[in-house]
Image: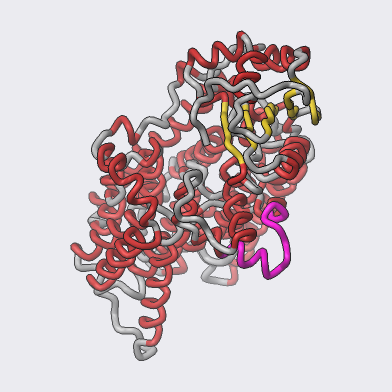
Amino acid sequence: MSQAAEMDLPTTSGTVAPARLGTIILTIVLAGALFLWTRSLGMSDPDRMTDLGLVSIVPSIFHLSIALLAAGFSWLMIRGRTSGPLPLLYLAALILVLAATPPIVYGTLRYSWAWKHLGIVDYIQRHGSVDRTASFLAAYHNWPGLFAVTAWIADRFGVRAVDLAPILRFTPPALDLAICAAYLQLIRRLTDDPRLPLTAAWLFITANWIGQDYFSPQGFSFLFYIILLGLFLGPLRRTAAPSPSGGFSGVLASAVAMVLIVAVVVTHQLTPLLVILSIGVLTVGRRLSPVYLFFALIAQLLWLLWGAAPFVIERIHDELAAIGTLSEATSKMANVGTVSAERGQAIMIGRALTATIALFAVAGGLRRLWNGFFDYTAVALLLAPAPLLLVAYGGEAVFRVYMFASPFLAFFAAALFFPSPAAGRTILSFPLLFLLCLFSATGFLFANNGKDREYRFTKDEVATAKWLYTIAPPGTLLVEGARSYPSQFANYENFTYLPISEEDHAARREIVTDPAGVFYRWMTDPRWNDAFLILTRSQKAYLQASGMPPGDFDRMENILLASPRFHLVRASSNARIFRLQADRPRAGGYLPSRR
């Protein structure tokens, strides 16, 4: 079959008009989808959000825009129209709709972790370096690559870390666009069928719902990992033909790879292990020179024994004890029975999305095998993250394994439709691909944005937190409803943090029963120079979604407002800060150990 026939391109003057008409129609569909999306933004009120997350506030035209994107993209793939910018524009539009909607609609930086990351940048700006012996946020101080670079850039422009928040809230769409571009280059190393990388990219974007594309070490390390794999399977591949440029491009690619390996090693704890595992399987499969494996191992060992030595020495015993304990690796998986009904629904849809991609990947892999493609390299890289299940990693290992496997799960899922260049043109191909693209994009909204009632912060929550972190003196106790609010982004080392959400069941019941008495006992402890209690809308959302009975949070607030022991020092519609009355002595008493 000729390339023109396979790509459904016009071959004679008589067929030019239909091909161009199809391109015009699909361009109009794309423009219409983007128009509906932009219209939906102004119709989405985040204050109406429920425990379903973002999907509970977007209007029907938002979902229609996704349906149009899925239909147009699926038709492009089934008809083989993969040349030109149109397929890439569809992928870029998908990323905008999924990743740019939250920062635009919410108007503030999402995720409490992103605010903590700004806190490390703030620390570096104020002190000139990290504190490798820090007892709180210790991992960030021992893997400071992203934060050090961000602090350096902020200093060059003369801005504080907290001033970066309005810009960094758009990290997800920017990072996702970069990851998608790198992913396309990677998958093109595995197939000659241009439909397969593009379809896999759609599924990869929507299946990778773990939510690591915000301003985080993991997000940038994941981008570097995808770029590294593209280099390893491309210009650095051992079986690749010699470069016509006399070897310069190979040397340049090798230098870039080594710089990226070092960047990953100094930025994130877990990703270097995955880099080593992936390089290892490529080396064993004779796809890559062992030089890169030795380099990655040496870089990782040097950092563990020097750069992160204080952290390693303190935590190595606990980490070794947790190795091989699957319950530790999966402890962050939500128990649907203990959360609200809507939160449980969002969780189950996310799990259904994951299961669907996995099942399609198995079927696609078998269909590729049936068509004579063995895909040893893709299978090896798909399975490479599995040993990370032996690492507890705060109970998140299972999510990280899925995230690192998702590039190749998406590849094999797409292969179910396009197992060979000659396949994928049956009458059922379009509706089935359309349904999968639509379900994956819709499922992403539940899986990735299902917790946005607590991950999204109002502007007055941000303003209230800024005020608190500015006026609170060193040695202050900050009692919090939960850590799900804009926190620890400035002067964070000056405070001790006590989240109610991390207390055991008995302590939480005591707090609900007698909040004034419990908080008074904690806040009068003579260890503190001062003490504040901050309660916010996002904290309330977190506690209620985690099983706090309706009304308990409001009851707790009302008791504090009526208590003569406490003074409301700052209040807005979504945040309140309490302080002890000035004439109250410091009585002391039991306080849980928290940072």
In front of the other: 328 or 348:
328
Image coordinates for residue 433, horizontal then vertical, percent = 47, 43
Left or right of residue 78, residue 244 in this image: left
Please say if 231 is above or below 543.
below
Q: Is residue 515 above or below residue 85?
A: above
Query: Which picture quadrant has residue 274?
Result: bottom left
Residue 123, percent from left and from top: 60, 55
Can residue 432 be seen in the rendering of this structure? yes
The answer to whether 174 appears left or right of 257 in the picture is right
Query: Principal SS element in the magenta part?
Result: helix
Please state the horizontal and vertical placement of residue 294, each as a whole percent of the image. Answer: 25, 69
Query: In this image, 217 relative to 568: left or right?
Result: left
| Residue 342 figure quarter | top right
Instruction: Residue at 64%, 50% (x, y): give it.
Output: 96
Span colored in magenta:
149-164
- Magenta run includes residue 158: yes
Residue at x-position 66% and y-position 39%: 486
Instruction: Pinpoint residue 117: horizontal percent, then vertical percent.
Output: 57, 50
Does residue 66 show up? no
- Judge by depth and name the residue closer to the eye, 439 or 129: 129
Residue drawn at x 58%, y 37% is: 496
Instruction: Please tell me how many numbered marks the rendered image carries.
Output: 0
Q: How is the image coloured?
A: secondary structure
